[in-house]
Image (cartoon, rainbow, N blue to C red):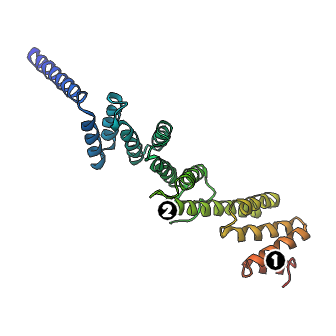
Amino acid sequence: MRRLIRFWLILGLASLAACGREHHVVHHWPAQRFYQDGVAALKSGNYTMAIRRLQELESDYPYGRYAAQAQIVIAYAYYKNGESDAAIAATKRFIRLHPTDARVPYAYYLMGLVEFNKNRSAIEHFFGVNQLRGRDTTSAHAALRAFGTLVRRYPHSRYAPDAAERMNYLVDMLARNDIGVARYYYTQGAYLATISRCRLVIEHYQHTPAVEDALGLMAMAYARLGLTDLSRSTAQVLALNFPDSTYLRKLERAHILSR
């Protein structure tokens, strides 16, 4: 028994010594080696190791030329590892520390991309199901802000076209989400809430197809409240802008509009 205990004790000490030697060697690497090892881990899908190596690089060489690159690559590694909040924090830190760096446009793009994909139950796959179904829209708005900053400040960036396309998608989704909420209010008899949500769509999403629904629902809600003049004037705006709208037939049957 004593021999067995001695064997395991020696084996444990040997393992600790080996770990100590590996730790010692790693922390004497040059910055380039840290970076290359981190990128290699990233490419192989070992995101945790990539983050560890790049953090070690920044710790040992905080002012070297590899440090800034490590910071933005760490943000991407967090994103790929499913650590959305850490990825967003890393991109914001990079922008704060390097506001004039040529990689700032990418940082904004990555921030938007993380928010865009942060909650797949809320933001569906790109150009997939085109609605938020009344869910929390915080991530969608955050993505819109990040992409908007990129497009506004860096319109010639290689990332700007994709960001603009995603913005159009997000705006359409957000508008449809509000229409979904307005429809729910209407079915529940909450006509003032319906009107309020429809106004929001008309004011903030003027160039989306959801405006037709907003005008139609608003006209019908006014009619339900007995506000015939407001219902009629809203219906006339609808007819002028969307002459083939199915809402017009409903309003005609309700004697709100005649054509």
Residue 182 located left or right of residue 16:
right
Which amino acid type corresponds to the residue marked 1 in the rendered image?
A: Leu
Query: Residue 89: in sight, yes or no?
Result: yes
Q: Secondary structure at mark 1?
A: helix
Which residue is label 1 attached to?
Answer: 251
Q: Nearer the viewer, residue 7 or 58?
A: 58
| Residue 157 in the figure: left or right of residue 176 | left
Could you say where residue 186 lies in the image, as x and y percent from the top left? 76, 63
Q: Residue furthest bottom?
A: 259
Query: Quadrant of residue 74 in the image?
Result: top left
| Residue 199 in which image quadrant | bottom right
Tell me the SS state at disc 2. Answer: helix
Horizontal relation, residue 121 to residue 75: left or right: right
Name the kind of residue labelled 2 in the image.
Pro
Name the residue at 21% across, 23% down. Answer: 20
Q: Is residue 247 visible?
A: no
- Identify whether 97 is placed above or below 176: above
Residue 93: image x %, image y %? Answer: 48, 37
Work out whether residue 124 or residue 43 is closer to the camera in this orientation and state it: 43
- Mark 2 — residue? 161
Q: Is 164 placed above or below 30 here?
A: below
